Image (tube, rainbow, N blue to C red):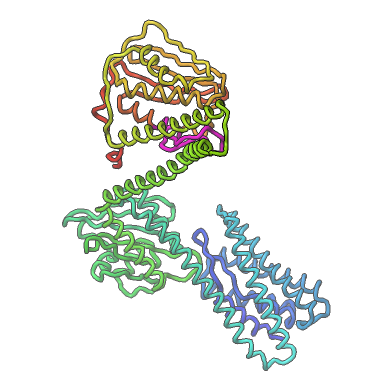
Amino acid sequence: MVPWWALAGLFALSEVSVVHVEFRGDAHTFSMNEILLVVGLFLATPSDLVLAQLIGAGAVLVVYRRQRPIKLLFNLANLCLQACLAIVVFRMVVGSAGPSDPQGWLAAIIVAWLALLTSDVLINAAITLSGGNVPQDERARLLTIGAVGTATNSSIGLITATILSTRPSAAVLLFVPTAVALATYRLYLAGRRYEDRLETMRSSSLTAQGSMGHDATVQSLLDQARRMFVAELAEIAIFPSAEGENTDVLTLGADDRLRRTAVRSGAESVLWTRVRALEAGVLVTPAESDHRVSIECDVRGIRDAMVVPIHADGTTAAVLVVANRLGDLRTFDAWDLRVCETLGSSIGLSVESARVADLTRTVEGLAELNQVKDDFVAMVSHELRAPLTSIRGCVSTLLRDDLVLAPEDHHGFLRAIERQSLRLQKMIEDLLVVSRLESGTGPSEVRQVSVQGLLDQVLEGLAEAITGHALVLRLPEPLPKLRVDNYKVSQILSNLIENACKYSPSGSTVAVSARADPRGIDISVENGGEGIPEHAQTRVFDRFFRVDDQGRAGPGGMGLGLYICRRLSEAIGAELRLDRSDARGTVFTLRLPLKTPTSEGIRPRLAAVE
């Protein structure tokens, strides 16, 4: 039998080597207690096992980790409940079996996993009651890792119990696997902390790229610093650029409120002065030897802290303070300070990067244009392939010497070639129009016209495209004449009517109506198609956007028609809008002001990258 005091000492050693999992400013732990729990179940009385765990772990929680009373009571109750449940279940399962019997193996692993689940339920209940919530994927990850570790610890515990019950002197051989298991826990702890802080550092770096003059940016940055180091307080002191001015201090405390204060020249913090003199970060511990620092920390309620410089333009432009480590973790250490210095350097770089913000935006604009170019190449290569393939197939058929075609078939192939050639011509014309719009050039035909004359001109050019549809004109009389760019308005109306026919069933009605008011004339084009899906209606005027790309079958095209219409309407000072699109059909309306400006002021699209 193992005496209770020896078991208590081992429980204390195990509790010193726990793995901390940080969450919401608190720390929860996984330990190697399962090894000792399994040994105690086989080689100690139930009362000795409970007593040893409470005394050994409790001493560490009080002396080493200095836990608050409420958390100390919670952890001791958790340990006591785990031990009692383990003893009851173990006695029910193991019977008279020993640590070398399969029944004993099963009992040990079952009770170890039961202890893990009990701890998980209690900890998550405590977090929930305190207003927190552990994400399910995070909880599942921790449980999976804990289950693997528990199985490993249980196996080591069974080996230990077997050796101690048969040959106690051989227990020294357990040193290697136990040390490996402990090292694995330590590596997990280091990896977890590194992963979490790397992610927080990445988020902080992105946040730091915002303007340090915006309180929202500073608050987000300070909050991330607090979470990164599980701290209660974080602040940034921004030094003035000229002597005699105040230092701007922004502090985020436990109440999550950002406070801004101005510290006059000559009243700076001792901590700031030390950091500026050293040009390096400093640690403030509970056993601080500098009397002035101790007094300042007592006044401000700071127990421990890290203070690091933020360099910009070769000088210390600001300092970052992270103070009061939360939970039962120990105080900040040298590794924490190095990470905090890295964060300070990141903030400093973001301050310097503000000088090239305009260049960055320009580069982003060029990247967007490059993406548009890639989209254009992909779209054109796809859309040109279909008519070219059709033309090539028809020509190849007509050139065959071994095939005699009837006159009507011969004529049908030629008509197909003509249709596909016209389709190619329309694509090329659209591309030329887009090119002229992007460059700010293009023909202009500003003259006085009537709405009736405009529509007659458009319908004459669309005679073939509207075949198979009933076209209805609703034009009230009289309508005032307009001085407009005849070429551009005709192209807009032509595209709208052609689209209305293309996206409505054969034999359906396409209606063109106009109405006037003192400010201008609205020309609407309505079809009876199935309508544009709601999620696509905000994008119908985007370049290269096609509704059939969104999972619906359609007549194809490069997605330039409505984009061209919108750009042309902008160029002449008109307004093009989608009034309605539902099961009844779709209505587009072109609003022409009575005094439409010319297109001389068209801006090249490249100049819009600002």
Which contiguous range is marked in magenta? 538-563
Q: Is residue 297 above or below residue 361?
A: below
Q: Is residue 204 above or below residue 454?
A: below
Report the residue that reaches farthest toward the top. Answer: 477
Please tell me which residue lies in front, 98 or 597.
597
When asked about the image quadrant of residue 274, the answer is bottom left
Please tell me which residue lies in front, 605 or 339.
605
Q: Is residue 350 above or below residue 474?
A: below
Please tell me which residue lies in front, 590 or 104.
590
Does residue 355 appear anywhere in the picture? yes
Whether residue 340 is in magenta: the answer is: no
Does residue 549 appear anywhere in the picture? no
**Spot occupied by residue 125 in the image (x, y as percentages of width and height):** 62, 57
When asked about the image quadrant of residue 448, the answer is top left
Report the residue that reaches farthest toward the bottom. Answer: 169
**Spot occupied by residue 87 in the image (x, y as percentages of width and height):** 75, 73
Q: Is most of the magenta stretch helix, strand or loop?
A: loop
Q: Quadrant of the C terminus?
A: top left
**Spot occupied by residue 356 in the image (x, y as percentages of width and height):** 26, 53
**Spot occupied by residue 260 in the image (x, y as percentages of width and height):** 32, 50
- Please state the total of marks drawn on the protein image: 0
Q: Is residue 494 left or right of residue 412?
A: left
Please tell me which residue lies in front, 423 or 160.
423
Q: Is residue 172 left or right of residue 580?
A: right
Q: Quadrant of the N terminus?
A: bottom right
Q: Residue at x 35, y 22 (%)?
A: 489
Report the residue that reaches farthest toward the right. Answer: 96
Report the residue that reaches farthest toward the front. Answer: 401
Q: Residue at x 31, y 20 (%)?
A: 486
When asked about the image quadrant of residue 152, the answer is bottom right
